[in-house]
Image: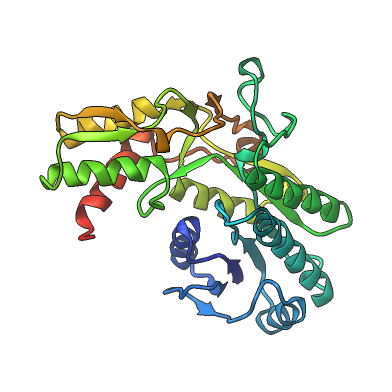
Amino acid sequence: MKVLITGASGFLGRHLLQLLLENDLEIHTIDLKPCDIGIQHNVSLGDIDNLKNTLIKVAPDYIVHLAGITHAPDTNTYYTINTGFAANLISAVKAWGNFSCPMILTGTSAEYGLVAKEQLPITEDTPAKPYDHYGISKLAQTLMGIREARDGLPLIMIRPFNIIGPGMPSHLALQSFVQQIKKIINKETEPIIETGDLSPSRDFVDVRDVADAIWQLLSTPPAYGEVINICTGTGVTIGELLNRLIDMANINVEFQTVSHRIKTVDVPIHFGSLEKLHKLTGFTPKRDLETTLHDVLEDSLATTK
């Protein structure tokens, strides 16, 4: 069995590659950066003809579209990459002529936007009201996927919540905390951790569990055409997350709130329902928050940078 993954060098992509390798799949990737696993194809997601030719050459049994951006230098870039590249890939699949190849489109819980407390947990039927261009561009991708699925393409639109785990990007709050803790442990800085607002609550899900869910969904035909949350179903405040890390590191620190870490608009509380995913696949997260935080901290301390 062959799988084609876009954005394979990213945080989620690297973990998914490892999982698929363990399951003996032939892996093909499309990415701007080099990938250590699989056969990489140097084709742009902006080039529909070359994408079609790559699909004909590879003839994948599954496609996972992970490519996207969370931060962009300008508004148009969000839509070019997060919406336009998905549209190009779908057009290439249709030109290829294979209408039976399951494909994951990776959205985000940011598509839901600001959700009232009484509407929690967030289900797939919760109205999507994104408040920034990242969420809007991803919602546009999801709506496009729903439309194409109605026309017969076996598309699955996933909405992962706050993905954390070993190797996570430096711009995420958890990784920022971990890097500051590492410097304190190594006595490179004073025992002070810079923070933003610690009160928001989020649904933190392990990246390895998200990879597991994707793999299960690809082989679940009833999921085709559906929008599906990938989450834990539990909200944890950023402050609790930080306190758990500090306890694990066994250090005494002070907190210092700094303005550049405070978001202009932020969601106070945000957690999802995984009932639909569980009903479709039997999926439940394997890793609790304690395990994930331990692995994130260990991974950071083992890294020389």
Is residue 97 depicted above or below 75 in this figure?
A: below
For this orientation, the residue located farthest to the left is: 187
Q: Position of residue 150 (x, y in %)?
A: 87, 51
As drawn, is 290 to the left or to the right of 19?
Answer: left
Is residue 191 depicted above or below 171 in this figure?
A: above
Is residue 49 depicted above or below 286 in this figure?
A: below
Residue depicted at 55% across the width and 65% down the height:
7
From where the camera sits, is residue 298 visible?
yes
Name the foreground residue: 171 vs 3.
Answer: 171
From where the camera sits, is residue 219 visible?
no
Residue depicted at 49% across the width and 30% down the height:
202
For this orientation, the residue located farthest to the front is: 259
Residue depicted at 53% across the width and 24% down the height:
268
How many marks overall? Answer: 0
Name the foreground residue: 49 vs 212.
Answer: 49
Q: Quadrant of the C terminus?
A: bottom left
What colour scheme does the image use?
Answer: rainbow
Q: Position of residue 146 (x, y in %)?
A: 80, 49
Q: Quadrant of the N terminus?
A: bottom right
As drawn, is 239 to the left or to the right of 184?
Answer: right
Q: Position of residue 303 (x, y in %)?
A: 23, 58
Residue depicted at 67% across the width and 51% down the height:
220
